[in-house]
Image: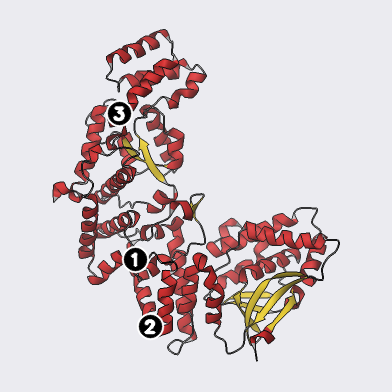
Amino acid sequence: MSEQQYQSLRAIADLEGKNFIIPSYQRGYRWGEREIQALLQDIWDFAQMQKQSDFYCLQPVVVKNNKEKYRIIDGQQRLTTIFLIIKKLLENKDFFNISYETRSKSTDFWKNIKDKTQEEIENIDFYHFHKAYEVIQGFFNNESIDKNKFLEVLLDKCKILWYEIAPKENENEVFIRLNIGKIPLVEAENIKALFLSKNDELDSDDLKDRAELWYQSEIEARENKDFRYCVLNKINEKEDIENKILKDDIQRIEAYLKSLVPPSNKKHYLFEYFYKCYKDGTLNNQWSELENAINTLSGFASGKGNDKIDREIFHYLGFLILSGENIYSLYKEWKNDTNKESFSQKLLAMIQNKISKIENIEQLRYKKDDAKIKEILLLFNLEYLIREESSNEYFKFNRFVLEQWSLEHIYAQNSKSIQEAIKGKDNESITQWLEETLLYIDDDMLKQEIKQSNKESNFADELFDKINDNFKNDETLHTIQNLTLLDKESNRQIGNQIFSKKRKAIQKLGEQDKLIPIATRKVFEKVFSENKSNPDIFEQKDQEDYLAAIKESLKRYTKENK
């Protein structure tokens, strides 16, 4: 019987009472507001057309009939959305049934989805179901939408292209063929389909165990805002981050898959590697390798070890990944000698090799050497945490990446911070700023001019131009001894404030649960300064003490220690 005989158009009404199963190789529900709103609006626009065509055609659904239970191979996002729309319009009744081969809790979650609260959202799947239902509710809260008419049109006038594959066709291979063009978005899901393909060596329990491990590994890597994932995988800040979170299309298990495959610039190299294994019959061996990688790397990246060696491996791994090393090379080092002490020393040697290439760190310049300065300051923070064994604090690489930390001047290098005060003629704030500025200026004539202006409360624009020029010519203000790390948002808020105000602002940000890097906190507390008598200034000697602390802390990573 040809596949063509299994193709037809079916009205949504024809799906009543049918049972659909989402196979274990499928991803979870991921439609967002844009896709849901588009579907709702398209149907409603069709319902209002004066000269309606016979029906409104929806995108295809591809299924395999297994004893009157239809396994969804393609189209589950749209079908799930239609299920939720009808559930809303029928006041929580199920028009047809959808269940998951794994993720059984998902089916339970939407039984009374209209009554679910934020507290009941346990995982990313529940989150997307709940958000979808909220979007649907919002659409029908519009009084201009006739719910009865919408439901009538949806059931009777909307039809899906129904493709039912032949009984002997391998559904996993059909899934892979259908999704081959979508690899840029769901490459890991296509690899998952390969691993969950039935073969003579696996029974249904084996496949369920694989699906469960895959799912749990994804959940675990996502926990605490992608804590583990950001240790093991370099994030593309421009493409992968949206509103301080990773875009959901990113499959977190990708980090473990990458640890097994030599890196390549070739597009879809991961899928092609595992597809070759699938074709030549060695994929089951790769699954065993993947299990080992997940167990090992997830443990290293968990941030839960209490021993010094665990803390070293965690911080070394995170640093190397951020600085461009690939997880395949790092994991290969572990497989060559599965001893934590040896592994830690290998990672340390790699960092030493990288950092030793950066010479004369005191000569690194802001803007020109940003990447190098950021690496040095990041390593300074990590080394500080590694040494502070009593705290057992782990660096939050996820927040470092997602909040986009950047370089911040400890002492501001221009008068931008008091522009509002100048405009508003706030002489008290201007005087305070100029008093602090005097501590940083060596030009005697300019100092005298500042003092005279303060005495007379006469603040000409030319004075601030001269101060800005003086700062611009002060090379030390743009070197590492006057730089630290701060997240992008905080940097914008307080970047141009004088030291005394910036110190208080950073203290306040810390109280508001803003993540302030430990070395940034310490430099504004003047922990590295020999003279702590005045906490509100950061003079040349403070800068020199800070530079000395950085150099001392990083001795074991640099040529000075080789």
User: In the image, is residue 536 above or below residue 226?
Assistant: above
Q: Position of residue 436 (x, y in %)?
A: 34, 21
Indicate the amino acid at tag 2.
Thr
Instruction: Relative to 476, say whether 458 is above or below.
Output: above
Query: Which of pointers 2 and 3 lies earlier in the amino acid sequence?
Result: 2
As helix, strand or loop, the secondary structure at mark 2 comes to loop
Quadrant of residue 254 within the rendered picture: bottom left
> What is the x, y in percent for residue 148?
82, 63
Q: Nearer the viewer, mark 2 or mark 3?
A: 2
Q: Is residue 519 visible?
A: yes
Which residue is at 39% across, 64% downward? Answer: 265
Give the distance between the C-alpha atoms of the residues marked 2 and 3, in whole angstroms: 62 Å
| Cα–Cα gap, marks 1 and 2 | 23 Å
Q: How many marks?
A: 3
Q: Is residue 207 left or right of residue 503?
A: right
- Badge 2 crowding class, 10 Å Cα cut-off, few under 14, some 14 to 19, many 20 or more, is few
Q: Which residue is mark 2?
A: 282
Question: In the structure shown, which secondary structural element does the residue marked by tag 3 occupy?
Answer: loop
- Please name the residue that numbered disc 1 is placed on: 297
Q: Earlier in the sequence, mark 1 or mark 2?
A: 2
Residue mark closest to the camera, 1 vs 2: 2
* Along the viewing direction, whichever of 83 and 544 lies nearer the viewer: 544
Residue at image position (39%, 42%) is 406
- Tag 3: amino acid: Phe
264 left or right, relative to 120: left
Quarter of the image with the N terminus is bottom right
Q: Residue flagged by tag 1: what amino acid is it?
A: Leu
**Residue 538: numbered disc:** 3
Judged from this view, the residue extending furthest toward the front is 266
Q: Mark 3 and mark 1: span between their CA atoms?
A: 42 Å
Query: Camera-side residue: 336 or 361?
Result: 361
Q: Position of residue 71 (x, y in %)?
A: 61, 80
